[in-house]
Amino acid sequence: MGTGNQTWVREFVLLGLSSDWDTQVSLFVLLLITYMVTVLGNFLIVLLIRLDGRLHTPMYFFLINLSLVDVSYATSIVPQMLAHLLVAHKAIPFVSCAAQLFFSLGLGGIEFVLLAVMAYDRYVAVCDPLRYSVIMHGGLCTRLAITSWVSGSMNSLMQTVITFQLPMCTNKYIDHISCELLAVVRLACVDTSSNEIAIMVSSIVLLMAPFCLVLLSYIQIISTILKIQSTEGRKKAFHTCASHLTVVVLCYGMAIFTYIQPRSSPSVLQEKLISLFYAVLTPMLNPMIYSVRNKEVKGAWQKLLGQLTGITSKLAT
């Protein structure tokens, strides 16, 4: 079909996970509860770090950024999913679809870079503890956080512009839960080889490069931990990194599985489930992982709850 005969769609239709009404109602309730827990959990983590002076360190500064990214990422996808679960015609305007792709892709990229930055922070904390406060000073932490936000946003802007310049002809049915990059590219009625190359390159730059930095950081960390003589010292060093390492495995694992090989990607159902897990469960689990596996955060929770209990007791008397 020539360019002159191509038509541009004004809206897309998301096919979602299921067309069965009972299934959609069940999914709505489950997603609504999960989303509320996600927002509350990440808000409480940010509030706790702001209130407890012992947590005013580089690690928790980056954790605040991670929580903001998680809430924003979930918000870019989940409310739209909830609205679509209650209607038969799951339409999304062209501009809204582009905005959703920009924000979800950008926030995902920010998270990958931010996790690499947090790995560097853990590397300095374990491998060079005496100079930790000198190296990870406030200015550097701020610059690293800004770099994470800018790099993810710029990559997303580039991918969004390139993707939505493709002629979609009359193809408007997106077989996905959201306006996801690969799902939108598949709608194009022209050759998308250049787009797939662009996706591959950006995946290598924004996904594999940070992943390699994380890998190198943890190789050095593990090497340093193994040199520690005391068992207690090794345990303490390991617990310093355990929460971050768990989050890294969750986030990078799913993203690499989805984006690194567009041509030999998993089935559409697998893509939907991975996207759902990444949009809903990962943002909910991150604050839980940092709360359960981190002694400093648990101590801060106990202190805050103790203070609240004391205030409640005074008010009751």
Image (cartoon, rainbow, N blue to C red):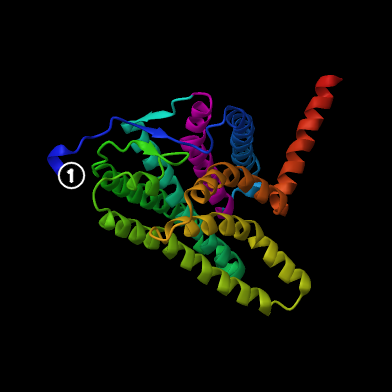
The x, y position of residue 166, in whole percent, is 25, 44
Assess whether residue 76 is covered by the magenta stretch. Answer: yes
Looking at the image, is 90 positioned above or below residue 102?
above
Question: Residue flagged by tag 1: what amino acid is it?
Answer: Met
Assess whether residue 137 is covered by the magenta stretch. Answer: no
The x, y position of residue 171, in whole percent, is 31, 38
Residue at 61 percent of width and 42 percent of height: 284
Closest to the observer, 298 or 285: 285
The x, y position of residue 94, in whole percent, is 32, 32
Principal secondary structure, stretch drawn in magenta: helix
Closest to the observer, 214 or 8: 8
- Is 35 situated left or right of 111 in this image? right
Residue at 35 percent of width and 44 percent of height: 184
Element type where label 1 sits in the image: loop
Q: Given the current orientation, which residue lies at the most extreme left position? A: 4
Q: Given the current orientation, which residue lies at the most extreme right position? A: 317
Mark 1 residue crowding within 10 angstroms, few (<14) / some (14–19) / many (20+): few
Closest to the observer, 280 or 62: 280
Q: Which residues are magenta?
A: 58-87
Looking at the image, is 294 positioned above or below residue 83?
below
The x, y position of residue 13, in whole percent, is 39, 32
The quarter of the picture where the N terminus appears is top left
Residue at 37 percent of width and 42 percent of height: 102
- Is 297 situated left or right of 221 in this image? right
Find disc 1 in the rendering and name its residue. 1
Looking at the image, is 21 positioned above or below residue 293?
above
Quarter location, residue 119: bottom right
